Every structure is written in structure tokens, then in C-alpha cells.
């Protein structure tokens, strides 16, 4: 079964003013579509054609670089769209809030670490909040389209929040001001969706 571009759960202009309509249209409709198309090409005729994307990602070292780049691109962006919402922002509650306080001391400290991971990632990549094997939360960053679920990741875990810091994620609106985009991103995070992912990952 070929992979397909997932539909957005909100309109392309719904995240404004934090993330603009044109960026969403190009990022979702062109960039993510290209990852899907190239992933399907790279997997054609291999056993990966019938695998779930999560299983491919977990065993990414067995696959060609084209699968790592495009499979990562598909997985990462699918997560990215799902943890943003026009009604996002604020702070997490319940078990996730407690786990963040335990791991980082406070929500504000988590936000600093998460922003720093995105700001200090040289070139293109991602900032992640993930659940480690011991159930604890951790912040890390990865280059390109890598993620913590990959068997080649330096910091391994199940990602529950990902922030794209590739220039195509913010350059139309923020130009080279990555810090402004990182700050704006926190206003669209759907903490209910992140909490659901946290509950499943534990």
C-alpha cells in the first residue's frame, strides 16, 4: 500500500498569525507531498512497501538513505501537523504536566530547553520532546529528517512533540529570524494531542 499525504485537520490559514497560510500551503501541499512521493518510489519493490511507517522508522538502518530522508520527512511532518491547532498554546495539564515538571523542573524550563534545542540545531532539523525507554521525558534535536524513533538516533525515544526548524517551515514569514518562529510555534501547540501521544508512549 502506497503512503499518502494526510489531510490537515484545520484550514491552511487557521494557524495565523503564528504560521501563515502560504507557508502552510507550500509546506504541507508541496514539501510533505514530495516526501510521500519519493518515499513510495524508494520503497517500490522492497519489503518496506507493506510496512507501517513507524516500523520502517524504527529499523531505518536497514534501508537506503532515500528511505531515511523521505520516510523521516513523512513521519515527522505527519506528527507536526497533528500536534498543532488554531486553539493551541497555553500549557499542558494532567499527567503530561506532572511529567514535564518532574523532568525539567517547570513548564517554563521545558520551553527554554525545547527552544534551545531548535535554536542550536545547525542547519536543518527538528527539536523533539520524546518519551525515553524508562518512561521519562527528554528534549533533543536531530539533523535533517531524522527523529528519536530511528535506531540510528543519538537520543532514542518515542516522539510526542516535534518542531520543524528547516528554513522552509518559517522563512516566508520570519526570514532568518528562527527565534521568532520558535516562540510563535508554542502558541499553536495542541497540548491535548501531545498528552494523547504521551499516554500511548508510556
Image (tube, rainbow, N blue to C red):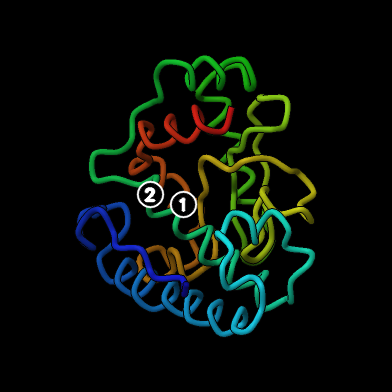
In screen coordinates, is 135 left or right of 96?
right
Q: Quadrant of residue 190?
A: top left
Q: Is residue 186 above or below residue 118?
A: above
- How many neighbours does mark 1 have within 10 angstroms: few (below 14), some (14-19), or many (20 or more)? some
Q: Is residue 45 above or below residue 1?
A: below
Which x, y percent locates residue 170? Answer: 43, 64
Which x, y percent locates residue 16? Answer: 24, 55
Which residue is drawn at the image coordinates 38% and 49% (left, top)? 82
Give the number of callouts.
2
Q: Residue 79, labelled with which disc?
A: 1
In screen coordinates, is 1 left or right of 150?
left
Which residue is drawn at the image coordinates 65% and 66% (left, top)? 144
Q: Secondary structure at mark 1?
A: helix
Which x, y percent locates residue 117? Answer: 64, 45
Which x, y percent locates residue 164? Answer: 51, 57
Q: Secondary structure at mark 2?
A: helix
- Quadrant (top left, top right, bottom left, bottom right) of the C terminus: top right
Q: Residue 97, labelled with which disc?
A: none
User: Which residue bears the numbered disc 2?
Assistant: 82
Q: CA distance from mark 2 to mark 1?
A: 5 Å
Which residue is drawn at the image coordinates 31% and 52% (left, top)? 18
Q: Quadrant of residue 173?
A: bottom left
Q: Do tag 2 and tag 1 residues touch (Cβ < 8 Å)?
A: yes
Amino acid at each position: 500500500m502506497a503512503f499518502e499525504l494526510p489531510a490537515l485537520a484545520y484550514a491552511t490559514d487557521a494557524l495565523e498569525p503564528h504560521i501563515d497560510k502560504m507557508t502552510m500551503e507550500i509546506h504541507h501541499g508541496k514539501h510533505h507531498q514530495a516526501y510521500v512521493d519519493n518515499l513510495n518510489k524508494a520503497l517500490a519493490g522492497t519489503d518496506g512497501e507493506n510496512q507501517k511507517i513507524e516500523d520502517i522508522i524504527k529499523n531505518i538502518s536497514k534501508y537506503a538513505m532515500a528511505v531515511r530522508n523521505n520516510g523521516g520527512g513523512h513521519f515527522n511532518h505527519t506528527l507536526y501537523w497533528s500536534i498543532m491547532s488554531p486553539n493551541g498554546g497555553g500549557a499542558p495539564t494532567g499527567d503530561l504536566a506532572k511529567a514535564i515538571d518532574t523532568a525539567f523542573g517547570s513548564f517554563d524550563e521545558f520551553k527554554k530547553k525545547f527552544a534551545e534545542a531548535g535554536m542550536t540545531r545547525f542547519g536543518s532539523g527538528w527539536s523533539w520532546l520524546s518519551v525515553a525507554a524508562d518512561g521519562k521525558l527528554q528534549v533533543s534535536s536531530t539533523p535533517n529528517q531524522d527523529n528519536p524513533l530511528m535506531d540510528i538516533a543519538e537520543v532514542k525515544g518515542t516522539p510526542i512533540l516535534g518542531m520543524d526548524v528547516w528554513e522552509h517551515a518559517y522563512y516566508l514569514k520570519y526570514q532568518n529570524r528562527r527565534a521568532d518562529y520558535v516562540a510563535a510555534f508554542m502558541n499553536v501547540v495542541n497540548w491535548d494531542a501531545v498528552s494523547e501521544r504521551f499516554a500511548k508512549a508510556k
